[in-house]
Image (tube, rainbow, N blue to C red):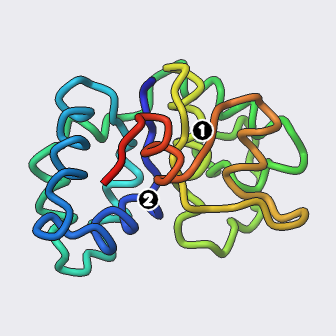
């Protein structure tokens, strides 16, 4: 399984699981990275750069730039599919849309990355890893993933799926 990591999960990993306190977790995570089972997107790297909390997240991310690729054509096509669903159209940035819509973007600062994460997971048959949860009718990563039948879970779900225990 390839995991597509959202900003919220990078925050959880670096903020709650410090390397010096959780060496086994970081060793196992490193094995997933080395094995090509961890990826993200360029938009998430930009969010990390914009809010680096001096917890090593930006330094680590810059040392692993291959995990943050540009959007592929397949991903761009899927972004248009997301936009075609009226309930989700506001989460897709205007530069991807086929129209000249001036709709406001979601106020969530991580919203820009959301559809790109989902498109990446779809393109590689991966699983989106996010700390977001379903909340009523709000459009969040899990609700879009559910609509398109894309696997989605939390960092804890990743650990469970990999059968990690500490």
The furthest residue to the bottom: 53
Marks counted in the figure total 2
Q: Is residue 64 above or below residue 8?
A: above
Query: Residue 44: x percent and y percent?
Result: 39, 54
Q: On residue 9, which mark appears?
A: 2
Tell me the crowding category of disc 1: few under 14, some 14 to 19, or many 20 or more residues within 10 angstroms, Cα based: many
Q: 134 or 71: nearer the eye?
A: 134
User: At x 14% / y 57%, what residue is drawn?
Assistant: 23
Query: Residue 45: x percent and y percent?
Result: 31, 55
Image-based side of 146 in relation to 20, left or right: right
Q: Is residue 138 above or below residue 89?
A: below
Question: Could you tell me which secondary element the residue under label 2 belongs to?
Answer: helix
Q: Badge 1 is on which residue?
A: 118
Query: Residue 106: x percent and y percent?
Result: 69, 68
Q: Nearer the viewer, mark 2 or mark 1?
A: 2
Q: Is residue 111 above or below residue 75?
A: below
User: At x 73% / y 68%, what residue is drawn?
Assistant: 104
Query: Residue 125: x percent and y percent?
Result: 55, 20
Q: 40 or 77: nearer the eye?
A: 40
Tell me the crowding category of disc 2: few under 14, some 14 to 19, or many 20 or more residues within 10 angstroms, Cα based: some
User: At x 47% / y 64%, what residue is drawn?
Assistant: 8
Image-based side of 80 in relation to 58, left or right: right
Q: 148 or 134: nearer the eye?
A: 134
Image-based side of 107 in relation to 155, left or right: right
């Amino acid at each position: 399984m390839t995991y597509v990591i959202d900003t919220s999960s990078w925050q959880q990993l670096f903020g709650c699981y410090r390397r010096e306190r959780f060496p086994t977790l970081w060793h196992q995570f490193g094995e997933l990275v080395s094995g090509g089972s961890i990826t993200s997107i360029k938009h998430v790297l930009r969010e990390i750069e914009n809010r680096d909390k001096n917890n090593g997240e930006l330094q680590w991310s810059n040392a692993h730039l291959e995990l943050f690729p540009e959007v592929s054509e397949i991903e761009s096509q899927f972004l248009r599919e997301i936009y075609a669903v009226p309930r989700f159209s506001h989460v897709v940035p205007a530069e991807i849309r086929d129209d000249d819509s001036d709709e406001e973007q979601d106020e969530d600062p991580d919203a820009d990355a959301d559809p790109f994460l989902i498109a990446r997971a779809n393109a590689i048959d991966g699983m989106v890893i996010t700390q977001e949860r379903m909340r009523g009718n709000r459009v969040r990563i899990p609700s879009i993933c559910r609509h398109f039948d894309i696997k989605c879970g939390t960092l804890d779900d990743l650990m469970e799926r990999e059968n990690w225990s500490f």
